[in-house]
Image (cartoon, rainbow, N blue to C red):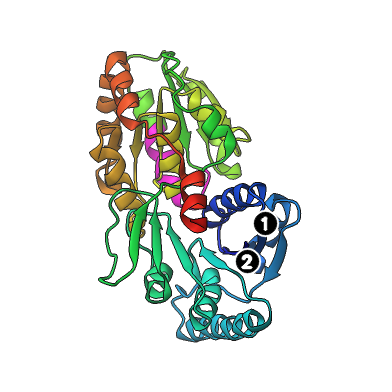
Amino acid sequence: MKIWIATGGTGGHVYPALSVAECLAARGHRITISCDGRVRDMVRRGAPNGARMVHVWASGVGAKSRINQIWALTKIAVSAFALTLRFMFCRPDRVVAFGGYASVPAVFAAHVWRIPTFLHEQNAAIGRANKFAMRWVQTLMTSFPTVSGIPNSTTRVVYTGLPVRRDFLAAAGAPLPNASKLLITGGSLGAQILDDVVPTAVAAMKNKKIFITHQTRPENVARLQKFYADNKIRANVLSFIHDMAGAIAGADLVIGRSGASTVVELQTIGRPAIFVPLGINPDQAANAASFAKNGGGFAIAQSQFTPKWLTATLTELFDNPSRLDKMAKKALVPNNAVDLIADEITK
């Protein structure tokens, strides 16, 4: 079977697409992956052997400038026209889109030629690009059991979960280390609030037995190292964590933003978390709420994420390891997403 996989934009769209592509290729299907220039190198490195790559001209439409929005839509329209012509001569049997505006051209072209089309939504609230593309899709596959914002349509909705990398699957269900280890994942500009609140909160705790692994932006590393050292807090401050699966598995509690990949990775391994959704991103709020609903942790608005609240919360949790154990069990969600998606596409 010839299967066209459309992805692009960010790693959150690309890594799940590559995991499914690898599975489908191993089952003997011929794979073509389309993406935009922002992730071309990422796709090239991770694509299965024998897979073809196609570049699409696309970018996000979320710019504030009206001119930039029109330009982004023009690029998507040109790519949609180009893929429609391409499918006339080289028609795939299935088209699978993993969200983002870079996947819209392939979805439109598949609709023109009546090719069975599948769309995967990573977040617990449907994104704008996917909401727009759903009019041309037969099956929507979701990362979370409940997804808000899905328009009323004839599209079939199937809960599959979100594919994660093999190292996360290998760590699934690992017991908590019970070593008072706290992991902070805050390596982006939008995570500055974590760098401001967490060190202050930990410094105010009476129990200084906590060991912290703190991921931050490169320019913040020296400042945080000094703060932790001055306050006699054991900490390892890094600008990048190469083995994120190992870091999560080695933690008793995680604090971070709530992008879909982060939430599902913690669910896959089974780790309690405190999620502080990015305020301008409703997707993150929905993801965090979905996680907290199962009892695996907390979803707290940035305005309420204060040093005083965090000091009290961390003290209560680390003084009661049995509660962290219970939260870890509630956070754990078996992840069979790759096989479920591959089965859905090929059946």
Return the mark for residue 43.
1
Q: As drawn, is 244 to the left or to the right of 305?
A: right
**Prevailing secondary structure class for the magenta stretch in the rendered image:** helix
Q: Position of residue 306 (x, y in %)?
A: 28, 38
Identify the amino acid type marked 1.
Answer: Val
Residue 35, labelled with which disc? 2
The residue positioned 36% from the left and 58% from the top of the image is 281
The kind of residue tagged 2 is Cys
Q: Secondary structure at mark 1?
A: helix
Disc 1 to disc 2, how far (Cα)?
Answer: 8 Å
The answer to whether residue 225 is seen in the rendering is no
Location of residue 294 (image quadrant)? top left
What is the total number of numbered labels drawn onto the structure image? 2
Q: Is residue 285 above or below residue 101?
A: above
| Label 2 packing within 10 angstroms: few (<14), some (14-19), many (20+) | many
- Asked if the residues shown at circle 1 and circle 2 are in contact, with their CB atoms under 8 angstroms apart, the answer is yes
Pick the front one: 133 or 195:
133
- Vertical arrangement, residue 192 with respect to residue 64, above or below: above
- Residue 72: say if magenta: no
Could you tell me residue 215's position as x and y percent? 53, 36
- First in residue order: circle 1 vs circle 2: 2
Which segment is the magenta one? 187-198
Q: Residue at x 47, y 28 (%)?
A: 172
